Image (tube, grey):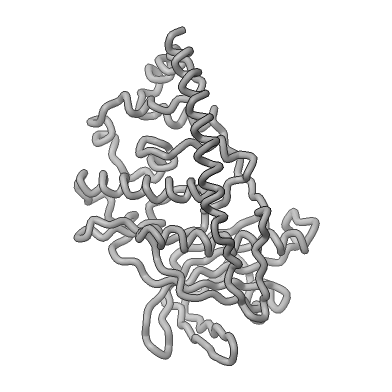
Amino acid sequence: MSTWKFDFTGRIEKLRRGGQSKDMIIEEQLTKVENDFNAQRYALVLARRLDSGRRVLLKIRYDLNPRGFDIDDLQENRELCDDEYLGELETVKIVNSINHGPALLDWYTKRQSEDMPYPQKGIMDVYIMDLVPGENVDDIFEDLEWEHLRIIRAQLTYILETLRIQGRILDEQHPRFLNYNKKAKKLYFFDFSFCSEIPLDELDMYDPITQYDDWVLAFNIWPDEMLRSEPRELLLLKVPQISQRQINMECKEWDCLYLRQYLLHICHCRREHFQREVSRIRDRDENRPPQWHPGYFGKVSQTWGLMMAMTRKSQNTSINNNIDA
């Protein structure tokens, strides 16, 4: 069948390990993302266990036929896919640890069946998450009061900054990645398709994330009227190596609220994957979980903190010199 027509809705997925099986019926395919770089497609689906009736989220990552993609080394590509998958499992655990994401319940790996895009040869990785409370932000943000929008922005900043500290960044932003529990005033991040690890040699390019950074504002759910009501000076707090004259010129042309779009062009961050110094190894026959390395994230955070302190000192000096000039 044509790969672009493939949909999991209505399928029954049998997830087996050690003689036991968890049979899931897919009730709805929520999202589908194609990754041309490594010839994979990702799907986030709403599923229900046939034995208990419990509803869960499944994240499915499955291979496409590498023919037609610019992939020279299939073994290297397979290792890259494995590492990205295991890294995504770690990201789920990080967000859940701060109570802003779903719990990771289980994970499986199997060969694709005959009715899938790359049968027999293609791998399908699946992990199971519990459902998060609330409603999807993409469906409700236009009707939310400013109080709730500000809560969402503050909690989203906390989530993204936590990920940054752990060496991860969100490459794309969309409100459908989020659920918001209006009664509890709690935000949940549950779609991890666009989370990637920051290359070790680029850690110093990523400043701490604030509510006024494009990493947050690009979710595009906050009305300009609300942003205009806040102190404009805050929008200019983090301007690396830009003269006041440049700022004034851009502000006159676009208005300060849109300066962040300009900053994205001059502060370009490459999307690049890195393999960790301590590799994560998985035995496909046993569906082993990621091999955790106690203290690893702590070392990353300490190194990050030292690098960021040096970077901020250098940038503050540069900004002051530019403003004085």
Front residue (pair 137, 107): 107
Q: Position of residue 97 (x, y in %)?
A: 41, 61
| Residue 171 seen in render | no
Q: From this viewpoint, which residue is outermost toward the top?
A: 325
Q: Is residue 243 above or below residue 22?
A: above
Q: Is residue 30 above or below residue 169?
A: below
Q: Position of residue 119 (x, y in %)?
A: 69, 77
**Rendered residue at 73%/63% (across/down):** 66
Q: Quadrant of residue 209?
A: top left
| Residue 310 seen in render | yes
Front residue (pair 42, 268): 268
**Rendered residue at 59%/63% (across/down):** 85
Tally the marks. 0
Q: Is residue 209 left or right of residue 224?
A: right
Quadrant in the picture for the N terminus:
bottom right
Q: Is residue 158 above or below residue 290?
A: above
Q: Quadrant of residue 260?
A: top left
Q: Is residue 256 left or right of residue 316?
A: left
Q: From this viewpoint, which residue is outermost toward the right?
A: 72
Q: Is residue 296 above or below residue 133?
A: above
Q: Position of residue 231 (x, y in %)?
A: 26, 27
**Rendered residue at 47%/15% (across/down):** 243
Front residue (pair 233, 208): 208
**Rendered residue at 19%/60% (across/down):** 183
Q: Quadrant of residue 191?
A: bottom left
Q: Position of residue 145 (x, y in %)?
A: 19, 47
Q: Is residue 138 left or right of residue 124?
A: left
